Amino acid sequence: MPANINVKICGLTESSDVPAAILAGARYLGFVFFEKSPRNLTIADAAFMAASVPEGICKVALVVDATDDFLDRMLAEVPIDMLQLHGKESPERVTEIKSRTGLPVMKAVGVAEAEDLPKLDAYIKVADQILVDAKPPKGADLPGGNGLAFDWRLIAGRRWPVPWMLAGGLTPDNVAEAIAMTGATQVDVSSSVESEPGVKDAQRIRAFCEAALSD
């Protein structure tokens, strides 16, 4: 199993989620700005939560096809370190957002079958990181955070020239297997460390991080 695994806990909604995730060993904290999500935050709430995050922990804003106006307003108040683009943003839009904000960008790409993998190549050329996620089912309200996994064998042994993160259906019970199968050194979790949609559970966060960070 790879050493030095980085864990991202996404979709924090309460101030208490911040220390719970950090104490468990998370290196990335995700704040969601998407109205259809049960994890959606107001700019004011996100600013309050992000202000308590210590140096060395990456604060990530998850947005879905965000407008320039929203990005400007959000970034004026929230001390974000990275943007996670989880919509249908084109490679050109990724470049525009990087230039406008001056922040590194992680682009989420949904995978369900081998035919989805070539999409990664276009974004690797423009994004600072790639989030390899399970493609949402047709008609789903959420582009991620659906608790679905994809067949990890599709990316077993694959390597890309930029850092990448594995997401989609990861749990305390399967994350070690996922890391071993894919070679991922970064993993992202949201729904499986909740007691109900949008409510993080400190014990489940700790269990996930322990499983991901164990030798």
Image (spheres, rainbow, N blue to C red):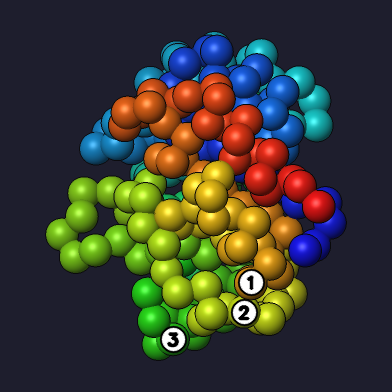
Q: Tell me the amino acid under the disc marked 3.
A: Ala
Dots 3, 2 in contact, CB < 8 A: no
User: Nearer the observer, disc 3 or disc 2?
Assistant: 2
- The image shows residue 191, relative to residue 162, as above or below, that is above
User: Nearer the observer, disc 1 or disc 3?
Assistant: 1
For disc 1, the neighbor class at 10 Å (few under 14, some 14 to 19, many from 20) is some
Q: Is residue 189 left or right of residue 197?
A: right
Disc 1 target residue: 182
For disc 2, the neighbor class at 10 Å (few under 14, some 14 to 19, many from 20) is some
User: Callout 1: helix, strand or loop?
Assistant: helix
Percent across and percent down for residue 57 are: 74, 32
The residue shown at (72%, 23%) is 23
- The image shows residue 173, relative to residue 163, as above or below, that is above
Q: Is residue 48 left or right of residue 88?
A: right
The residue shown at (68%, 81%) is 157
Structural distance between the alpha carbons of marks 1 and 3: 14 Å
Q: Tell me the amino acid under the disc marked 2.
A: Ala
Q: Label for residue 114?
A: 3
Name the residue furthest right. 3
Dots 1, 2 in contact, CB < 8 A: yes
For the N terminus, which image quadrant? bottom right
Q: Label for residue 112?
A: none
Structural distance between the alpha carbons of marks 3 and 2: 12 Å
Q: Earlier in the sequence, mark 3 or mark 2?
A: 3
Disc 2 target residue: 156
Q: Earlier in the sequence, mark 1 or mark 2?
A: 2
Percent across and percent down for residue 191 are: 40, 40
Dots 1, 3 in contact, CB < 8 A: no
